[in-house]
Amino acid sequence: MSKVLFQWGITLFVLFFLVTSPASAADLVRSIVAFLGGVGTGLSDFVGNFA
């Protein structure tokens, strides 16, 4: 039961954040995507050096 409440709480918080501050939410998404792109590039370089 608490797991369901936790998931709903997180979902409602994210929706609240998106509605009340869309510019900040967009910046956060851009930062996360850039970070994941950097990780992917680093892993690709790392694996490429072994070849």
Image (cartoon, rainbow, N blue to C red):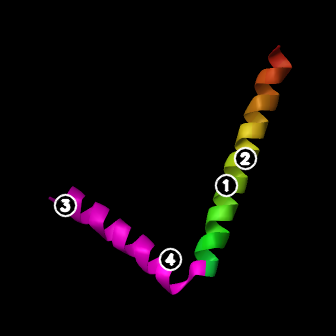
Earlier in the chain: of badge 4 and badge 1, it is 4
Residue that carries the numbered disc 4 in the rendered image? 18
Earlier in the chain: of badge 2 and badge 4, it is 4
Secondary element at tag 1: helix
Residue that carries the numbered disc 1 in the rendered image? 33
Q: CA distance from mark 1 to mark 2?
A: 6 Å
Image side of residue 24 versus residue 16, left or right: right
Q: CA distance from mark 2 to mark 4?
A: 23 Å
Please determine whether, in this image, residue 26 is positioned above or below residue 37: below
Q: Main secondary structure of the magenta part?
A: helix
Q: Look at discs 4 and 3 and give the one toward the viewer.
A: 4
Please determine whether, in this image, residue 12 is positioned above or below residue 39: below
User: Residue drawn 22% across and 59% down?
Assistant: 4
Earlier in the chain: of badge 2 and badge 3, it is 3
Q: Which amino acid, by three-letter code, is at mark 3?
A: Ser
Residue that carries the numbered disc 2 in the rendered image? 37
Q: Which amino acid, by three-letter code, is at mark 2?
A: Gly
Secondary element at tag 2: helix
Cβ atoms at labels 1 and 2 below 8 Å apart: yes
Mark 2 Cα-neighbour bin, 10 Å: few <14, some 14–19, many ≥20 = few
Query: Is 44 colored magenta in this rendering?
Result: no
Q: Please provide the residue range marked out in magenta.
A: 1-22
Secondary element at tag 3: helix
Residue that carries the numbered disc 3 in the rendered image? 2
Earlier in the chain: of badge 4 and badge 3, it is 3
User: Residue drawn 68% across and 63% down?
Assistant: 30
Q: Which amino acid, by three-letter code, is at mark 4?
A: Leu
- Give coordinates of residue 38: x percent, y percent: 76, 46
Image side of residue 42 versus residue 20, left or right: right
Figure quadrant of residue 42: top right
Image side of residue 16 versus residue 41, left or right: left
Q: Residue furthest bottom?
A: 20
